[in-house]
Structures are given as C-alpha cells and as structure tokens.
C-alpha cells in the first residue's frame, strides 16, 4: 500500500490553514500554526519537540517566547525526507498528565467537545483525528501516546526506548522519554518511523539497531492487570479477543508478579528525573528571564519558578523529596528494583507472544468529571500504559470500538526492537475497523 499524506505543492495551503484555524478555535489542538506556505507531506509536532523558528513552549508559561534556532534530530530527518511541519500541538505542561487538562487552553475531544482528549499528547491526537492522512510526532514517558490515541480514536505507536533520538526534545524524565507517532494509517506511521530511526551522535542514549518484525501467533492477556478495568470495557475486549482468535491467534492468560507496583515505581522514577530536568529553569538561561537583580536569592528563583503550573510544582516538590539522601533507599532504589524485575518478567512473556490489553481502564470522561479528581486517582488511570513505558517496550494503541459515539482503544506490546511487528499486526486487519472519524480537513 502507498502512503496517503496530505501534501501541498503551491496551491491550497492557505485555504487548508484557514479551515484548520477555525477548528482550532474550538478544539485547541495547536499551540502554534504556521501560516507560511508549505510544500511536501505535512505533519504536526508536539510542542515539546524543537522545530527551528517555531515557538517551543511544552505548554508551559516558563517557556513562553522561546523559539529554538535548531531542529530536533527527528525533524531534521523528516524535513530531509520531504516532510513539512505545519505547527506545534497542545499538550499537558512538560508532559505531566493523562487527560490533557494541564494546559492553560486545554484541547477538547474531536468526537465531543465536552470530553477530555487524554494526555499528555492531547493536541497531537486531535490534529491526527482532524486532518486527512496526518501523522503527528508525539512523545510518551508513561502513556502519553496510548492514552490520547485511545480517547481520540487514532493509532499511537510508542517505539522501543532509544531507537528514536531524543535530541531536541524538551525533557521530562530522560530514562523514560520516547518520541513516537500518531496516525490513522499503518503505512503513514511506518513511513515516518523508517525515516527517523537510528543512532544519533547528539543523543548518547540513542541506538543504531535493526528493527525486526517477528510476529508471534500468541496473544497474552495479563489477568492481574485486568482487575481495575471497567466491566463494559472488559466485555468489549473479550469480543476483540474472539475476533483475533478467529483470525488464528492463540489467546493465553497469565499473571505478572509485582505489576501492582508499576504505577508507584513509575511516578517515583519520573518525578525524580523531572525535578532534576526542571532545575534548569531558574530565570537566567532557559525560558522565563528574571530581570530584577535587586531581588535576593530566594526571591529571584521563586519569581522564575512560580511560572510553573500546579502539576509541575507538585512534581518538583515530590521529586526533590524522593531524591533526598535519607530516603532514597526507601523509594527510589526500590522503584528501580521493581523496574528491573518487571523488565525480566515481561521479556519472558514477550519472547513467546504479544501482550494485549485495553489501553485505558475507563471510558473517555467528561472534562467536568475529571477536573477535580485527586492526583493519585489521576495517576492510577495510567495502570495499563505504564508497564510497557517503564520497561521501554514498544507498544501501540489502536481504536477498536465505539460506545455512545466515543472511541476506545486496545494496546498491544512486543519485545524490544520488534516494533514493526506491531504495525504488521494492525495492517492485517486495519480495514476491519471502519474508523469513524468526524469529517476530516484536507
Ligand atoms: N500520565 C503520565 C504522567 O503524567 C504520562 C505522561 C507522559 O507520558 N508524558 O507522567
């Protein structure tokens, strides 16, 4: 199959942009839309990935006005391959969130504006749903691609940790951050992935490896992961398994010990890393500049750091606490041990087959329903997306049913460096899904 990106030669871009801007007034998919003419296949980019000459704010006030003078490696490679960036997509501030609401002008679900989009790659999911033949370059630390892909009815691929360079990504948690892709067709996602993979001297954690596509015929369901899942979603997931079994997959049930610790382990590690990564925003070099040098030491740093939103402040405080010397053994070191144990256990299963599960444990909530839930309740919504992210396994969310007009996704996981098998899995029966996107813009 050939890819079907929307592309412009010298006509049509202005009309397209004016329609996109109209939709954007309602849905807030973009933090920035580039009105300059474009040629080539168009893509959008999450606002925490640097594109030369376009604002990069990570939806944070502290980065307002920052315009990088360089391209992230992914953008460099895609522009060389004939892609053009049309704008920067909305997100939870610095990637902190699961619903997309930690942004001053949060994005709204394209299927129904009263509902959340999922986060943190909220705007990328909306842009992908809205625009014909679109791929958005997004990022996941603990589920930020799967969650919005599921709630907005698109495909979201999070590659193996390290196979896509993180150079030019505004970091959240460096041992977990992965640049990935959202799209509506397997072929489009594959094309973008092929153009971006591979080692990069500018990112010492990036890897030059061959990505395989070994497709097993076994699908593992992790029973102790399913206990917190909504009952109706469980039923629909059973229907999906029946369909897959009819296509020749063998369904196996298993259990993974310690899985219940994956969410706390993830938040301990990610907050520790976030608190060190955010330390660079101190009013001098990066982002918001404090110009008043009559302030004392505390006042100076406080006037810079009070630009952070509530969730960012929470993570700086908790992360700094977790890293303090007297308690690091009690939390951080245990979290690392859990991470290693889970990698070993999941690796064993993934050698035999895919792991499959719903992407999110709940139906898409309304904005009003989640605005005031506690942080711990919000964190627990990541119970299904955190395990593959914590362990760096490639995974993909794809839409598979609609309840009262809203989409919901399933997530499939494979072993490190076997990313293409996920796309092959989906391409076999992509046409069965009958994606129900609202009218697309082209
Ligand atoms: N919800 C998770 C968090 O808040 C994941 C975010 C992400 O993947 N960037 O950390």
Image: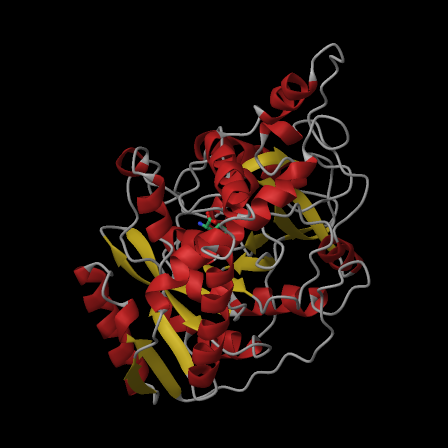
What is the quadrant of residue 14 in the picture?
top right
Residue at 22% in and 51% down = 404
What is the quadrant of residue 219 in the picture?
bottom left
Front-most of 43 and 283?
283
Image spot of residue 78 (x, y percent): 73, 58
Front-most of 198 and 35?
198
Numbered marks: total: 0
Seen in the picture, residue 309 relative to 6 is either above or below; the reply is above
Image spot of residue 286 (x, y percent): 73, 33
Quadrant in the picture for the N terminus: bottom right
Can residue 231 be seen in this snapshot?
yes
Q: Residue furthest top?
A: 294
Image spot of residue 248 (x, y percent): 34, 90
Seen in the picture, residue 354 relative to 383 is either above or below; the reply is below
Color scheme of the displayed model: secondary structure
Q: Residue furthest front?
A: 326
Image spot of residue 261 (x, y percent): 37, 62
Front-most of 385 and 404?
385
Residue at 52% in and 71% down = 393
Can residue 143 be seen in this snapshot?
no
Front-most of 399 and 430?
399
């Amino acid at each position: 199959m050939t890819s079907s990106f929307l592309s412009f030669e010298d006509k049509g871009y202005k009309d397209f942009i004016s329609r996109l801007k109209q939709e954007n007034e309602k849905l807030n998919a973009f933090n920035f839309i580039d009105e300059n003419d474009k040629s080539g296949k168009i893509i959008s980019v999450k606002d925490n990935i640097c594109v030369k000459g376009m604002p990069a704010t990570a939806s944070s006030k502290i980065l307002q006005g920052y315009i990088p003078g360089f391209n992230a490696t992914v953008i460099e490679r895609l522009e060389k391959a004939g892609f053009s960036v049309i704008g920067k997509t909305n997100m939870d501030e610095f990637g902190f969130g699961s619903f997309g609401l930690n942004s001053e002008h949060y994005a709204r679900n394209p299927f129904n504006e009263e509902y959340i989009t999922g986060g943190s790659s909220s705007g990328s999911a909306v842009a992908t749903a809205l625009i014909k033949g679109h791929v958005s370059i997004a990022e996941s630390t603990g589920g930020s691609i799967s969650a919005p892909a599921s709630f907005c009815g698109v495909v979201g691929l999070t590659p193996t940790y390290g196979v896509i360079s993180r150079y030019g990504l505004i970091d959240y948690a460096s041992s977990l951050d992965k640049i990935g892709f959202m799209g509506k067709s397997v072929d489009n996602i594959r094309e973008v992935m092929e153009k971006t993979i591979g080692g990069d001297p500018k990112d010492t954690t990036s890897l030059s490896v061959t990505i395989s596509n070994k497709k097993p015929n076994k699908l593992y369901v992790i029973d102790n992961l399913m206990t917190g899942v909504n009952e109706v979603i469980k039923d629909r997931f059973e229907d999906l398994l029946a369909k897959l079994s009819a296509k020749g997959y063998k369904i196996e049930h298993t259990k993974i010990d310690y899985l219940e610790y994956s969410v706390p382990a993830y938040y301990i590690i990610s907050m520790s890393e976030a608190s060190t990564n955010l330390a660079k925003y101190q009013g001098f070099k990066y982002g918001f500049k404090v110009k008043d040098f009559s302030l004392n030491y505390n006042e100076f740093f406080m006037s810079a750091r009070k630009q952070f939103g509530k969730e960012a402040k929470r993570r700086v405080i908790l992360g700094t606490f977790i890293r303090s010397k007297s308690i690091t053994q009690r939390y951080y070191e245990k979290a690392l041990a859990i991470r290693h144990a889970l990698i070993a256990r999941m690796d064993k299963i993934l050698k035999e087959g895919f792991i499959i599960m719903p992407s999110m444990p709940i139906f898409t909530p309304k904005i009003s329903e989640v605005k005031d839930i506690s942080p711990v309740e919000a964190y627990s919504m990541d119970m299904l997306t955190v395990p593959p992210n914590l362990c760096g396994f490639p995974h993909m969310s794809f839409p598979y049913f609609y309840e009262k007009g809203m989409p919901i996704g399933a997530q499939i996981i494979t072993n490190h460096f076997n990313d293409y098998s996920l796309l092959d899995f989906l391409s076999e029966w992509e046409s069965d899904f009958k994606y129900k996107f609202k009218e697309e813009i082209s």
